[in-house]
């Protein structure tokens, strides 16, 4: 699977940041509202810039979500009533 690009990572939004057991657990959403979860070692006193930098670095290792497309056959009856430009 493909990895997130730098541009895609920069477009993400942090939804929630939780500190537990010496780790930050960060939830971010992408432009399609898919949620990614990353975690990394840190300190509860880490500032926002540090958290964002570490979150972006962790997202570089995440596989990009790509929705599954299930091909569907097109049946002639499905086209009835459609204006096909004629």
Image: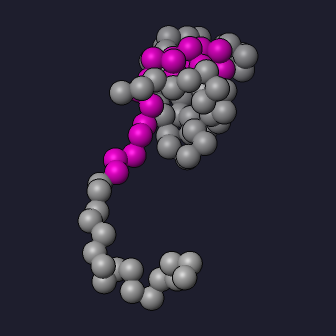
Residue 64, located in which quarter of the rendered image? top left
Magenta stretch bounds: 52-69
Residue 73 occupies quadrant: bottom left
Residue 67 appears at what percent x and percent y? Answer: 39, 46
Seen from the viewer's position, the closer of residues 52 and 8 is: 8
Q: What count of labels does the image hold?
A: 0
Inspect the magenta stretch and tell me whether residue 32 lies in it: no
Work out whether residue 71 or residue 80 is closer to the camera in this orientation and state it. Answer: 80
Instruction: Using the rendered image of the protein, determine whether residue 23 is visible from the camera's viewpoint.
Output: no
Residue at left offset 29%, top offset 54%: 70
**Magenta span has 56?**
yes
Q: Is residue 49 above or below residue 86?
A: above
For image coordinates 51% across by 18% down, the residue present is: 60
> Is residue 51 or residue 30 the one in the foreground?
30
- Note whether 7 is above or below 15 in the view shown: above
- The quadrant of the image that shows the N terminus is top left
Q: Is residue 77 visible?
A: yes
Q: Is residue 81 left or right of residue 18?
A: left
Q: In the rendered view, tell whether residue 33 sits above or below residue 50.
A: below
| Image quarter in which the C terminus is found | bottom right
Q: How is the image coloured?
A: one colour
- In the image, what residue occupies the spot 66% across and 20% down? 52
- Residue 77, position as x, y percentages in the image: 30, 83
Between 83 and 52, the one lying in front of the other is 83
Image coords of residue 30 (percent x, y): 57, 38
Left-right relation of 71 to 21: left
At 64% from the left and 26% from the top, the residue drawn is: 7
Q: Is residue 7 above or below residue 47?
A: below
Residue 44 % position (x, y): 61, 16
Q: Which residue of the protein is positioned furthest toward the bottom in this rendering? A: 81
């Amino acid at each position: 699977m493909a990895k997130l690009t730098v541009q895609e990572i920069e477009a993400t939004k942090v939804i929630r940041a939780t500190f537990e057991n010496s780790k930050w657990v960060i939830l971010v959403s992408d432009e399609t509202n898919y949620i990614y979860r990353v975690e990394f070692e840190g300190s509860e006193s880490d500032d926002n810039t540090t958290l964002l930098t570490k979150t972006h670095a962790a997202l570089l290792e995440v596989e990009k979500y790509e929705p599954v497309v299930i091909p569907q056959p097109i049946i002639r009856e499905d086209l009835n009533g459609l204006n096909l430009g004629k």
